[in-house]
Image (cartoon, rainbow, N blue to C red):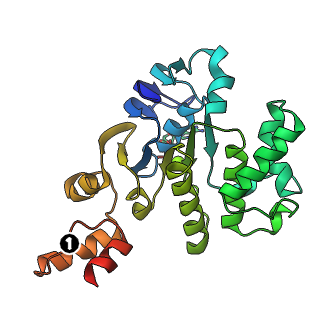
Amino acid sequence: MSQIVIQDVEFSYRGQQDKALDGVDLEINQGEFVAIIGANGSGKSTLAKMMNVLLVPDRGSVTVEGLSTSDPDNIWQIRQQVGMVFQNPDNQLVATMVEDDVAFGPENLALPSEEIRRRVDLALQVVGMDGYQSHPPHKLSGGQKQRVAIAGILAMKPDCIVLDEPTAMLDPMGRKEVLNTILRLNQEENITVVLITHFMEEAGLANKIAVMQRGVVTEVAPPREIFSNTALISEAGLDIPEAVKLAKELQERGISLPDIMTADELVEALC
Ligand SMILES: Nc1ncnc2c1ncn2[C@@H]1O[C@H](COP(=O)(O)OP(=O)(O)OP(=O)(O)O)[C@@H](O)[C@H]1O
Ligand SMILES: [Mg+2]
């Protein structure tokens, strides 16, 4: 059974005529790294909020490890299993010390203070922020703040993390730090990752990409398949990653190259 099962989900925001989600189907398996891409307003954030019960479907169903999000009795269990990280880390960090921010979630679980301390230290290690325990969050760089926000989620020991454009407000350096952290969570901590992103290079790192158009998931496939479907990409108002584009142009000029997904792969192939 898939970890998250979204079936024929419809949803309209209060007072809105148009459906933000109009029959979404998507399955996410334990340990997968799934990217969700789509034009502005296609419904990505709305779908993300369905995964940890910030919103519930008007019609259709969302289940997390077999628990329906439509049953109010399941809310807290699901929220513990599925953590959310948003675009702006400033909105997620509230304490005056990094360790207090990371401890916020586990404290709400009423865990013993020793266990909380252990979880906080471990979470900060995983995101590469060990040693910053007593730093004030507002003095950190954007990438560091976002990693602390991720540590706060990690300290809850979730099975799955949903990140809604977590790198959108970061500089290239911060983006790289956060992306490496996300990859580590998935590959080393075996946490399921759902990454919503406008950066096609980031989506290219996922196991599979879901493409959204006007409230519907129109395609789910591995990145190579998605980015070679130029009709789909342009219809969805998206672009293919620069490295993929460049590799295609080189191939058209007779340079033989393997399948390219990232700039690193292109550099390696050319060298
Ligand atoms: N709080 C809200 N109230 C009313 N309508 C909303 C609200 N949030 C989103 N919408 C509408 O729902 C639709 C889907 O929005 P959503 O934010 O899920 O898209 P998105 O794919 O995340 O877009 P973006 O790439 O800009 O973040 C859009 O038409 C949007 O205008
Ligand atoms: Mg959004």
Locate the C terminus and report the quarter of the image it occupies: bottom left
Quadrant, the N terminus? top left
Q: Can residue 92 be seen in this view?
A: no
Q: Is mark 1 on a helix, strand or loop?
A: helix
As drawn, which residue projects farthest toward the bottom? Answer: 271
User: Label 1 belongs to which residue?
Assistant: 248
Residue drawn at (34%, 58%) of the image: 238
User: Relative to residue 106, is residue 255 drawn left or right?
Assistant: left
* Closer to us: 185 or 63: 185
**Visible residue check, residue 140:** yes
* As drawn, 54 above or below 236: above
Quarter location, residue 171: bottom right
Relative to 57, is 118 above or below? below
Q: Is residue 154 above or below residue 144?
A: above
The correct choice, above or below, for 244 with respect to 28 in the image is below
Label 1: how many residues lie within 10 Å, few (<14), some (14-19) or many (20+)?
some
Q: Amino acid type of disc 1?
A: Lys
* Front one among 7 and 118: 118
Q: Judge left or right: residue 244 versus residue 52.
A: left
Residue at (53, 18) in percent of width and height: 68
Query: Can you give x and y, in whole percent of width and height, for residue 45 in the image?
Result: 52, 43
Which residue is nearer to you in this view: 205 or 114?
A: 114
Q: Where is residue 223 in the image (x, y as percent from the top left)?
A: 31, 54
Residue name at image x 56 percent, y 17 percent: 70
Can you give x and y, in whole percent of width and height, for residue 232 in the image? 24, 51
Residue 13 is situated, as x and y percent measured from the top left of the image, at 55, 31
**How many numbered badges does the structure rendering display?**
1
Is 2 positioned to the left or the right of 267 in the image? Answer: right
